[in-house]
Every structure is written in structure tokens, then in C-alpha cells.
Amino acid sequence: MVNKVKGFIIAKPELANSDVDLIWAIWAWQLAALKPPQKITSMSAKDLCRTWKEGTISSPFNISRSRRKCQQHYPETRGDEYVKKQHHQRRIKQDVKRETDKAAKVLSERSSDSSQQSPQVL
């Protein structure tokens, strides 16, 4: 499935940013390849779900997971959204690290302050 997803994204780069559009494109292609061919635009939601349940078309979860894996391994399939998410993720990690370092320092100072105080004898 990763290779199919890669082919779709290479052919239409805008599919890299939208799982819904990618799923639609793959389903339309899979349905057109059936004997007899089916048009996704003429199917009801119930028929489409039945076709998915029967395994005739790929699971949207599998397609989405394959897109993420494809973008992880093949930089040429990464869309604008991938780059934005990666940049945002780095910033969040830096923020979390800074805050946890601050918290660890405060806890360390409190711990050393309490150990320096001698216990009172009554």
C-alpha cells in the first residue's frame, strides 16, 4: 500500500496534505479497476461502506497509515502540512524540555534545602 500511496502523491502532490482526498482518489481507482467497473460518484454511502466492509477497497486507516509511512521514508512525498507539523513538533519538544528542566531544578533545590535542615529533637 505504501508504494501505491507514493505513486498517487507523486502524480498529484496535493494529495500529500489531505487524507480524505487521498482516500477518495485511491477508492475511485480501486473501484474503477473492478469487473464490472464502478464509479465512486454514483455509489451511495451505504454501498461504499458495504464495499469497504467486504474488503473490496482499502481501509481508510490503512491508507492514512501508509501515507504517514511514505512521507517518513520518502521526502519527495512530503507536503506543506508535513513540514509545518514537523517544525511545530520541534518547537513543542523544546518548550517541554525547557519546562521539565526548570521543574527538575526547583525540585532539586527543594530536596537539598530540606536535607540540610537538621531534624528537631523534642
Image (tube, rainbow, N blue to C red):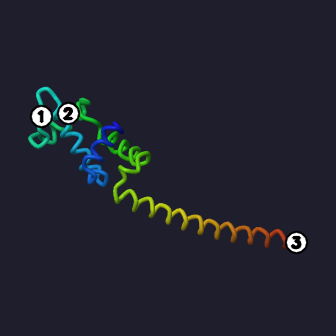
* Cα distance between the residues tagged 2 and 1: 11 Å
How much space separates mark 2 and mark 3, taking CA atoms? 74 Å
Q: Which residue is mark 1?
A: 38
Q: Quadrant of the C terminus?
A: bottom right
Identify whether 98 is placed above or below 75.
Answer: below
Question: Quarter-wise, where is residue 83 in the image?
Answer: bottom left
Q: Amino acid at mark 2?
A: Thr
Q: Residue at x 43, y 45 (%)?
A: 73
Q: Which residue is mark 2?
A: 51
Q: Label 3 belongs to which residue?
A: 118
Q: Amino acid at mark 3?
A: Ser
Residue neighbourhood size for the residue with mark 3, other residues' Cα within 10 Å, grouped as few (<14), some (14–19), many (≥20): few
Percent position of residue 37, x then y: 12, 31
The answer to whether mark 2 and mark 1 are in CB contact below 8 A is yes
Q: Residue 87 at what x, y percent from top left?
A: 45, 63
User: Which residue extends farthest left?
Assistant: 42
Q: Secondary structure at mark 1?
A: loop
Residue at left 39%, top 44%? 70
Q: Residue at x 69, y 69 (%)?
A: 105
Badge 2 element: helix
Relative to 40, 26 lies left or right? right
Instruction: Say which of 91 and 2 sits in front.
Output: 2
Q: Amino acid at mark 1?
A: Gln
Decide: few, some or many residues near mark 1? Use Cα within 10 Å; few <14, some 14-19, many ≥20.
some
